[in-house]
Amino acid sequence: MAEYKLLLPSMGEGVMEATIITWLFNEGDNVKEDDSVVEIATDKVDSDVPTPVSGKIVKILKQKDEVAKVGEAIAILEIEGEGSASEEVTSETPAAAPDTETLTTIEQPLQTVAASNVEFSGDLYLSPLVKSIAQQENISEAELKSIKGSGLEGRITKEDILAYVANRGNQPAQTAAAPVASSPKPAVSAPAATITAAAGDEIIPMDRMRKIIAENMVKAKQIAPHVTSFIETDVTNVVKWRNKNKAVFEKREGEKLTFMPIFVKAVVKAIQDFPMINVSISGENIIKKKNINIGMATALPDGNLIVPVIKNADQLSLSGLAKAINDLAYRARNKKLRPEDTQGATYTISNVGSFGNLMGTPIIPQPQVAILAIGAIVKKPAVLETADGDVIAIRNLMFMSHSYDHRVVDGSLGGMMLKHVHDYLENWDLNTEI
């Protein structure tokens, strides 16, 4: 018999660690190849880890709620094979690649850390990426302890150390770095008041995802000065077109035809008209994105929110968008998303109309610079201009709200982009093929 170390696999760009949620098998249980053996959670999604071999779990190395690094052994399996029980069979699991766009904030490219003489004690938890940056930049352990970490249990994240490096020459070593890389240091918020529960009040601890959402929303508001523009759009042609095509599409493809593919198509066209909406900020630089990846805010059955990403949305047809959207929405609601499914968004759409809301003021997810909220479609009397004069008719109207980061998106750009989305929807061709 031989031993096999089950390693925490790579989970996508920038993801360096995960928290163990629950083991699906116990020590002594036999597992088959491709069985999901443990549920893990990152700051993006929850997912399962399958075993690439069959065998018996002889030792669980990482218990529930413990954090494991990518490439670290989380369990030992006993498998068929030659050799003593002390022999190890290790799988080749590549470490997640660092975010190269964020790393541009460091003046010198990272080299191998072997040449560095900086060492750290076991008192301070550092992910491999954070440690490599610290060693390359010759950041001492004393400096690291002065950095206020924004990660789980106050751990130093990649963004924290990159922000520290960017501001290192402008502040004393003991000054805490801004929590998000490549962005101005946000104003210090007053601590939240402690609320005393009254008799009969129910205290509900936040779950892990709600904590992450809360932290990200606070950061987003601290970093970006939000401006929101509104417009009311006549989507009567869109409604007529969908009503005409939804049954045919479902019969042909076995997929529901919602309004979202149409909204995404209009947004993609408007982004192509105004590519400076499809950007991120890195320090004093603007990174203009090549790809158009549309985030799709999705409500989960437990009340939380997740944003799966339609990659390269500009390269998909309406039919392709419909299939991608349905697939992501289904997997989001059934906890089947992969970590990479929630990464890389360059612009986000939130359909607040699905809850019956007319409009909203959405918060821009970092590091994007704009987000569109789409309200409910409502039948209303509207004034139409005709060759014979103005008339009042029943039309399908919808509000859209466009929030944008005023650091780089002025009212003219944010407003014109929204107007182009409006125009594409109002002038939707009833003969558009699906």
Image (cartoon, rainbow, N blue to C red):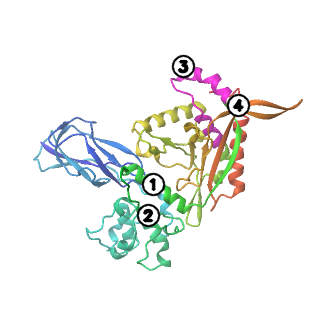
Q: Which residue sits furthest left?
A: 84
Front of the two marks 2 and 3: 2
Q: CA distance from mark 3 to mark 1?
A: 41 Å
275 within the magenta span: no
Task: Give the position of the C terminus as an image quadrant.
Answer: top right
Highlighted range, magenta: 239-268
In the image, is residue 255 part of the stretch drawn in magenta? yes
Q: Nearer the viewer, mark 2 or mark 1?
A: 2
- Check disc 3 and report the residue beneath it: 251
Q: Inspect this view and state whether residue 373 appears.
A: yes
Residue pointed to by mark 4: 236
Foreground: 85 or 181? 181
- Disc 2: which residue: 193
User: Closer to the camera, 2 or 429?
Assistant: 429
Disc number for residue 373: none
Q: Residue at x 45, y 43 (%)?
A: 341
Disc 4 residue type (three-letter): Thr
> Callout 4: few (<14), some (14-19), or many (20+) C-alpha neighbours within 10 Å?
many
* Residue 137, above or below 314: below
Vertical order, 334 against 290 (above or below): above
Residue density around tag 1, few if under 14, some if 14–19, many if 20 or more, within 10 Å: few
For marks 1 and 4, the one nearer the N-term is: 1
The one of 12 and 83 positioned closer to us in this rendering: 12
**Residues marked 3 and 1 touching at CB (< 8 Å):** no
Q: Residue tagged by mark 1?
A: 214
Q: Earlier in the sequence, mark 2 or mark 1?
A: 2
Is 318 drawn above or below residue 203 in the view shown?
above
**Residue occupying the point 52% across, 58% down:** 220
Which amino acid is tagged 1?
Ala
Inspect this view and state whether residue 204 appears.
no
Give the SS element for disc 1. Answer: helix
